[in-house]
Structure formats: C-alpha cells, structure tokens
Image (cartoon, rainbow, N blue to C red):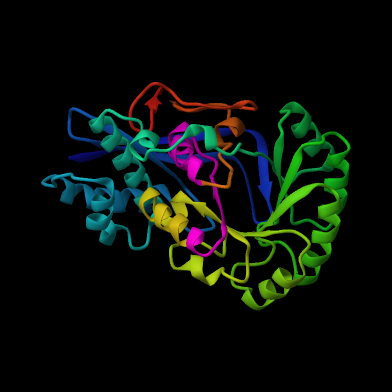
Amino acid sequence: MHIHLHQHLLKLKHHFKIARDERSVQPTLIVELSDNQISGYGEATTNTYYGITYQNMSEALLRANEALQSYTFSTPAQLWEDMKDFFASNPFAQCALDEAAYDFYGRKQEKALYQLWGLDLASMPQTNYTIGIDTVENMVKKLQETPWDLYKIKLGTPYDIEIVKELRKYTSAVFRVDANCGWSVEEAINNSHHLKKLGVEFIEQPLKAEEWEGMKEVFNYSALPLIADESCIVETDVRKCIGYFHGINIKLMKCGGITPALRMIQEARKNQMKVMMGCMTESTIGISAIAHIAPMLDYVDMDGPLLITNDIAEGVKLSKEGVIFPKRNGLGTKLIV
C-alpha cells in the first residue's frame, strides 16, 4: 500500500470569522490510500490554532508511507492502531489517513460505509448552516441567501444578543449558538437566558477550554444545554466533560479520525450525553465521512461544501431537504480536480 498527497485551496463564499480566527481561503490536504487497484480518500485542513500545516501533515504521512509499503491491510481500526505512533503530534494527518482507510475498506467490501455499520439513513439529523461573525447587516444577508431550517450562529462579540435578535426577525428557523471560547462566566449565564427566549437550541463552548471551574458554574445556572467543543478534543476528554457539559461535539480531525470518534460516541452514550459531530471548512471528501456517521448522532454540523465555491470532490449532496448519498461504495467520494 502507499499514500499519494493532493494539496488544494478551498475558496469560501464569504469571508469567515469566528471569535479567534478569520479567513477567505482554506488550505486542505487530500490523502489517497491505494494498493494500485483500489484507492480510498481522506481529508485534513491546515489549522493555525492547532499548529497544523501542509508541511507537518505531509511529513507525518510520508513517514507512515514507508511503513505501508510492506503493510498487510485488514481493517481501518487495525491500521489506525498500527500507525498511531507516526501521528502522536498530528491528529489531523492521522484523521485523513483513517478516513482514507475506511473509504478503501468499504470499496474493497463493495459496500457503502453506513451499510457496513448497519445504519439507517432515515435516522439522520439535519445539518445546520453556519453564519460566521460579520456586521449584523451582512449576517442577515447570509441568512437570507441560504434559507435553511437550522442555523449555527457564530458569536463572541460585545453585541451578541443584538445579533441574534436581529436575525430572529428574518426567520423562524432553529438557532444554535457557538461562542468559540469567547465569553466570560457571567456573559454565558446571562446570555443563555436571553438566547432561550430567542429560540436557541443550545450553546456550544461558551468559555475557554481550560476554564473548568467556570464551566461548572455555567452548567449549574445556564438556561440552555451546553455542548463541549474545544474542551473535548480526544477520547480521554469525554469523561472530563461529565457534569460540565450536556453533550460533546466531536471533530474528526481533532480526535484523529473515525476510529477514535466511534469510541468517543460510545463513551458519551454510556454517560447519557448528547453527541454532535462538527466539521472544519472542508470539501465533500471530509464531509462524506461525517455523513456516514451521522445516523449515530443527535446533532450534526457538516455544511463545509455549502460554504465554499470550488468543491474538489463529489460525494454526499446536502440540501435543505436532507442528504443524498451517491450509489458508490466506501465513502462514495470522487475527486473531480
């Protein structure tokens, strides 16, 4: 087996801003895992917050590629275990290889991944559509440009409640709010009561990831459920979130791929926590991986392809009405550039 790397720049429809970052283009790396007959594809984006670059992802993957030359593939989970030492400090690259392994495995078994898991697509939650931080006027324009039943509103500004009040004038859709670590304890508690009246379903990551004492207070007094994102990166973080959050948001790239994400889902369920899966600004390659897992989830944020103008792949198709899966095996993806 061997790896091929494909670098691309994804162009966003709108300049995208959250509490700690902003961008108009997103570099992404596509990993192709091949045995010269079948190829599987996975994806990982660069990320300044986590120090992830093309270079350090490529270096980790090329080291793993040497070991793969004589590797006998059995299952994606076994490959993840056998290759994990190459990715000790780069879960994004690990994720891309893991997604590619599941795609490869499904193609080899001649079944879609959700079929191999015995999942029912009828139980899939609807994806939200994300509105990044901008002027209130521009946020309204973005909302009107893409009518949807469920929006995630990025917040973390001095005028967050005013933003949601203004957006609410234009839609009766369900809102979710993501503060991206942008609030204080007092803000989080106060905002939760205002936001509940404005039809918000839950709040994602109100405080900085390490503010556990503050999160306990917010958990005790919040009017809305709280979902951990930056506070729940890897498997061992799930148990840390019990009693501080009502649920977790799993990001495949942050945790290292599908293999550990499945274990995180099981751990959260054992502890009666809600489970969400979110995405980065990624193409249909990475989003298709999330879509196959979606029937296991309570909530999903997989709107990546809806936010870019130059998708580099075909795969699942997202619409207000739901998700259409292609009649192809594995993740069902196909590079088109």
Q: Nearer the viewer, residue 217 or 207?
A: 217
Where 81 falls versus 128 (above or below)?
below
The location of residue 227, given as percent across then percent down, is: 63, 58
Percent x, y of residue 162:
88, 50
> Where, quadrant-wise, is the N terminus in this rendering?
top left
Q: Is residue 337 magenta?
A: no
* Rendering coords of residue 26 (x, y %): 53, 40
Of residues 113 and 19, the one nearer the viewer is 113
Residues in magenta, as a range: 268-296
Quarter of the rendering containing residue 84 = bottom left
Residue nearest the observer in this picture, 53 or 155: 155
Query: Can you tell which quarter of the image residue 85 is in?
Result: bottom left
The part of the image, by quadrant, that contains residue 231 is bottom right
Residue 248, placed above or below residue 171: below
Residue sitting farthest toward the bottom = 213
Q: Residue at x 63, y 65 (%)?
A: 245
For this view, does 150 lie left or right of residue 264?
right
In-front residue for pair 267/57: 267
Instruction: Tell me: residue 11, above or below residue 261.
Output: above
